[in-house]
Amino acid sequence: SLGLDVPQQEVQKRLLTKLKTMATLTTALKLDVLEKLVAEFGYTVKIGEPATPKPKTDSRTNGKAGGLQARPPVVTIMGHVDHGKTSLLDYIRKANVAAKEAGGITQHIGAYQVELPEGKITFLDTPGHAAFTAMRARGANVTDIAILVVAADDGVMPTTKEAIQHAKNANVPMIVAVNKIDRPDANPDRVLQQLPEFGVIPEAYGGQTITVNVSAITGEGVPSLLEMILLQAEVMDLKADPKGEVTGTVVEAKMEKGRGPVATVLVQTGTLKVGDAIVVGSTFGRIKAMADYLGQKITEAGPSVPVELLGLSDVPGAGDRVQWVKDERAAREIAETRATEIRAKTIFQASRGMTRSGLLTKLNAEGLKQLNLIIKADVQGSVEAVKGMLEKLKNEEVETKIVLSGVGTITESDILLANASDAIVVGFNVKPEGGARKEAEKQNVEIRTYQIIYELIEDIESALKGMLEPKF
Ligand code: GDP
């Protein structure tokens, strides 16, 4: 808050139009920007001592401060099927990656980087929020910015809505790419009109969500989409210490004939080097070789750089964390301990059955425990009814929070979200799909289905009282 007598929206507008800076209510502005901003309104800035000095170190560097440097944003593309996620990723890659110069074709390693005069952007190129949620379920938050693709001839669809909820749950800022504007039946304005209903208010309507009209076929608007990504990244002030502790996350991994386990890792802090000993989930190894997304051999990779690496003992899982260790022996020990722990946990979970009493542990700001719920029902009317009643359930100690609600069967992606957000899945007049049921068993996510609404309410009520009995 600037304490000026100016409406907030006006401040944001000036910031964007005059100072090319995007800001939300909670954005910390750089001093020079702040000075120019208040000057816009005829004031000057006088700097006093900060009341509470903020620690300057990034917690992930273990306090080895001082080396923080700007890093490229990591971007994921989400949206409804056929709205153009793959086409957009392909267009951006082709237009910005000089594969021929590099002497080869671009490799699909699960991520790529584009280099623009204003900066670099890292794209995760497994589109869709299933991958995004699977990574989050493992505690990996690699995405800085989500691009929500909405086809201008089709508008907001169920998966669009789901993607919005996933991005919101992960607290990842969203940029909306209204795609297919080259089509004669495209109606981008209609998309903008639809979005507020789902809690996404476009800037055109005085909100804070950037929207860009694009065509993944003609390329129209794509440069300004990239510009907006960089602008958003600048506002977020993304930093990492290339000399700090090495951390990274597996984006993709597979077994390849003749090469062994191959993993694409996104480096998050520090610099990964050939020869380093690492532990990745419950696998380990010494990095034998690394290649970038062009298939070129590289010897080191810093923050936000995706690399394909060889040398692991086994294939890790997407979302597994990479940890640097001093030598291969230490790496093996850590990996083996972890593998044992995972086995023990699996046995424990299996014996625990399907109860999730451990759910009621999340404390919110008021010290209330919170029961997270995902609601799926057969028709919109029942979704609203169930939601309305569950939202009201609350006692002195516990309250409910609805993470997602929607019409349709319980899907695998619901389970992934439930796992990521520690929720139970409640179905009314709907059943889980085969894949969802399997995933739920694997992740130990509880699914409860009902045909009678008062049974549902009663059950959740007793869950809130911590008396939830297992139901098979
Ligand atoms: P995804 O399922 O979201 O990855 O969508 P795809 O990228 O596979 O695109 C689905 C279909 O829409 C394909 O036939 C694309 O050629 C087409 N498409 C994607 N983007 C555009 C666009 O901007 N304009 C037009 N006319 N067609 C597009």
Image (cartoon, rainbow, N blue to C red):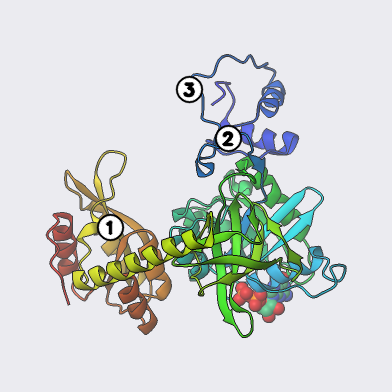
- Residue 52's label in the rendered image is 3
Q: Who is closer to the viewer here, 359 or 228? A: 359
Residue 29, placed above or below residue 117: above
Q: Position of residue 462 (x, y in %)?
A: 13, 59
Name the residue located 64 percent from the left edge and 84 percent from the top edge: 258
Q: Who is closer to the viewer here, 330 or 87? A: 330
Of labels 1 and 3, the one closer to you: 3
Q: Position of residue 173 (x, y in %)?
A: 55, 51
Secondary structure at numbered mark 3: loop
- Residue 401's label in the rendered image is none
Q: At label 1, which amino acid type do we have?
A: Gly
Q: CA distance from mark 1 to mark 3?
A: 42 Å
Q: Residue furthest right?
A: 101
Name the residue located 56 percent from the left edge and 32 percent from the top edge: 56
Which mark sits nearer the N-terminus, 2 or 1? 2
Which mark sits nearer the N-terminus, 3 or 2? 3
Name the residue tied to disc 2: 65
Q: Who is closer to the viewer here, 274 or 460? A: 274
**Ligand 1 rendered quadrant:** bottom right
Q: At label 3, which amino acid type do we have?
A: Thr
